Image (cartoon, rainbow, N blue to C red):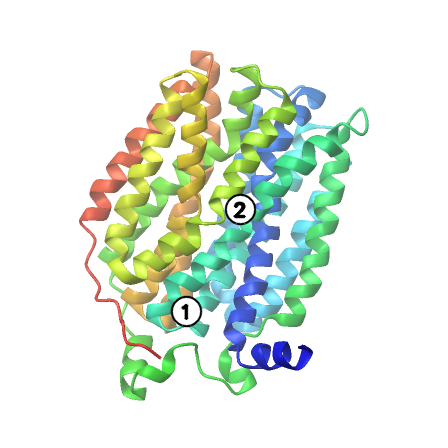
Amino acid sequence: MKSGISAAVKNVHYGWFIVAAGCLCIFASLGLGRFSLGMLLPAMGASLQLSYSQMGLVGTCNFVGYLFAVLFCSRIQSIIGARKLISIALLLIGGSMIMIGFARSFLLVALLYTLTGIGSGASNVPMMGLMSTWFASRLRGRAAGFIVIGSGFAILLSGLVIPFLNSLQAEGWRLSWFVLGVTVTAITVLCWLVLRNRPEDIGLHMVGAGDAAPAKRKQAEFRPLDKNVILHCGVIYFIFGLTYVIYATFIVTVLVQEYGFQEKAAGVFWSWVGFLSLFSGPVFGTLSDKWGRKAGLMTVFTIQTIAYLLVGLKLPNIALVVSIGCFGFVAWSVPSIMLALVGDLVGSHNTVRAFGIITFIFGLGQILGPYFAGLLAESSGDFSVAFLLAAFLTAAAVVLSSRLKAHKVETKKI
């Protein structure tokens, strides 16, 4: 039995171990480093007496750090390599999260969470870029889809564990930050042990590369950058960044403060988002490999529009259940499709650079989202206007996605 398992493992291309490590990396950097904030905000906000705008600004500071990292991570990666950069970035995330547990002022929390954002950007972009280094075009969406489900696992965990940790002591949110930070630090070690910068480092070719002639592979790897195409992709990614972050940051606050849910019950809802999102990346990444990136993005943004409308229109509680189901089902599909799309359009050699550019534009949306949602909530008294705005923007993204340049996806078998 053991020999059979050993043989099966030996027959698995090492690229899939990179995917497993990448899933852990995203679990730590984005999942715990960013998406756990929604569960921590109500208790932390009450303890530190934060206003709605300050709560939004905490999220915005994280995205400012993320954006700052995106500006430089491509250049740093070219010097030290993706493996070292990802490991250093994860250590920064873990250390800053532990320190937030000691913070007693808004300014210190904002500063430390900015550092967390820097670590998130400096680990996420090179990790996603590794997919174009390790996987051929027709498998890229699937591979990226499996990586992004790390965020879903983190949401599932945070929705169940954080309410429990918060209940253990008067300021249990501090204990939650400690536990999350230590977890990220442990994952850093695993990523360092598994990750490799390129298949050639261990004498391999990229997964799925055997079905194309060397000249064809080289041509696919070195396509020129088209600025108009990159800008088009960037605008779509900007809309995703601005809208999804409103939902991820404030849906728990809406459940607790506007609908009267207990924190534990809201955590169960948030856990369902995490569970459903486990399917989003693999399902829609694979579908985009088969049907095309354009069709995948149009489908995803349509479902997101429904999710935001159901919250913004302040419908009965059953509408919240449907909204959470819609959001969770497509939660992490856009990053996996966008990575595959960029890799298709610019070639694997330029993927990290191009994905860094559109991620920078995406980061601008993440910065604006939480802050303006908080301001709208303060001026109107609730978050309904912010969610309606998100719905309008994702509807616009459907139209923009329909105008993307079509790319013929490879369908040959290995």
Q: What amino acid type should be assigned to the residue bearing mark 2?
A: Gly
As measured in the structure, the alpha-carbon distance from the residue carrying label 2 to the one carrying label 1 is: 22 Å
Residue 72 appears at what percent x and percent y?
Answer: 50, 59
The reply to whether residue 159 is visible in this rendering is yes
Foreground tag (2 vs 1): 2
Viewer-proximal residue among 105 and 267: 267
**Residue drawn 29% across and 48% down?**
297
Residue 232 appears at what percent x and percent y?
Answer: 25, 51
Q: What amino acid type should be assigned to the residue bearing mark 1?
A: Ser
Does dot 2 land on a helix, a strand or a loop? helix
Question: Are there few (<14), some (14-19), or many (20+) residues within 10 Å of tag 1?
Answer: many
Above-or-below relation of 408 to 164 = below
Say which quarter of the image contains residue 357.
bottom left
Would you say 383 lies left or right of 61 here? Answer: left
Residue 91 appears at what percent x and percent y?
Answer: 68, 56
**Residue drawn 38% across and 68% down?**
139
**Residue drawn 24% across and 53% down?**
294
Would you say 232 lies left or right of 186 here? Answer: left
Above-or-below relation of 35 to 78 = above
Would you say 397 lies left or right of 19 here? Answer: left
How many numbered marks, from 0 up? 2
Viewer-proximal residue among 146 and 100: 146
Q: Which residue is mark 1?
A: 132
Q: Which residue is mark 2?
A: 152
Q: Residue furthest right?
A: 169
The reply to whether residue 386 is visible in this rendering is no
Question: Are there few (<14), some (14-19), or many (20+) residues within 10 Å of tag 2?
Answer: many
Quadrant occupied by the N terminus: bottom right
